[in-house]
Amino acid sequence: MISMTKTKTRRAILGLLVAAITTTAIGINVVAQRQRRPVRHPAVCGNPNVTCPTAFKFESYDLPFRMPQSAVIYDTDLFYAVILRSVASPADNCDNYLPEPDRLAAQILFPNNKVFTSRCAVPGQVSYSNTSAKAQFMAVYAGMSLAEANRMLASVKATGKFPGANIRRMRAMSLGDPRRWIAASVILYEGTFASVAVTAPPIVKATR
């Protein structure tokens, strides 16, 4: 009798172990499938003469990109830019950046490529990957390929105005409207923000 009880107990424990292992394997498989799912990144609008179809309100100094209405956090396709100038910007001071008149003067030199400047990375503003957290910069969009970037760099150097110009590959990123965050689920994919098209409720203005 005791032997039969021990056998039943062992079978019960074995059954629980098999169930646990199976559940874990299914969970791992689901996570792996989600990680293999392709991530969609919106395209940047590098030509300032063409209207950018986007639901996000960009500032004049931003590099705009195609951001849908429902998005909360987005980062773009990788692209190339030529860094024209940069200034030191301590972490506790967001007032030190390249002024708008400087950007407008540079934009005249490159009429078909957006000249953009960076600001402190805060909610509701655009920031850029692969750049220093201790500096703010002014750059000109240089295309999606290295060949395009090299041609733009040659054009920049030909002006003689930007001796320290250099090529940088980056993404533009936006944290979107902070009021939508409460409805957002942020998905991290391989260390970068994946393009998250979150179905967020519309922002309704309060009425009296």
Image (cartoon, rainbow, N blue to C red):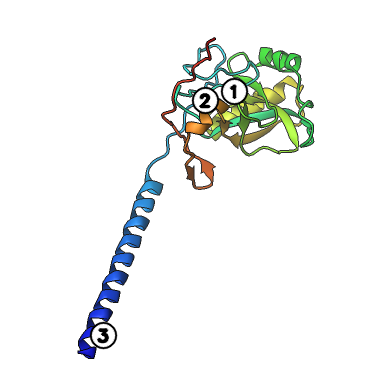
Q: The C terminus lies in which quarter of the figure?
A: top right
Q: Which mark is residue 6?
A: 3
Residue annotated with mark 1: 63
Report the front residue among 150 and 79: 79
Query: Is mark 2 in CB contact (under 8 Å) with mark 1?
Result: yes
The relative height of residue 145 versus residue 12 in the rendered view (above or below) is above
Where does the image place residue 200, in percent across and percent down from the top left? 44, 27
Using the rendered view, name the quadrant where residue 132 is placed.
top right
Label 1 residue SS? loop
Callout 3 secondary element: helix
Kindly indicate whether the residue at mark 3 contacts the one at mark 1 (C-beta within 8 angstroms).
no
Q: Is residue 112 left or right of residue 26?
A: right
In this view of the protein, can residue 39 be seen by the observer? yes
Residue type, numbered disc 3: Lys
Give the CA separation, mark 1 to mark 3: 71 Å
| Front tag of 2 and 3 | 3
Name the residue tied to disc 2: 44
Residue at (67% x, 37% y) in the render: 131
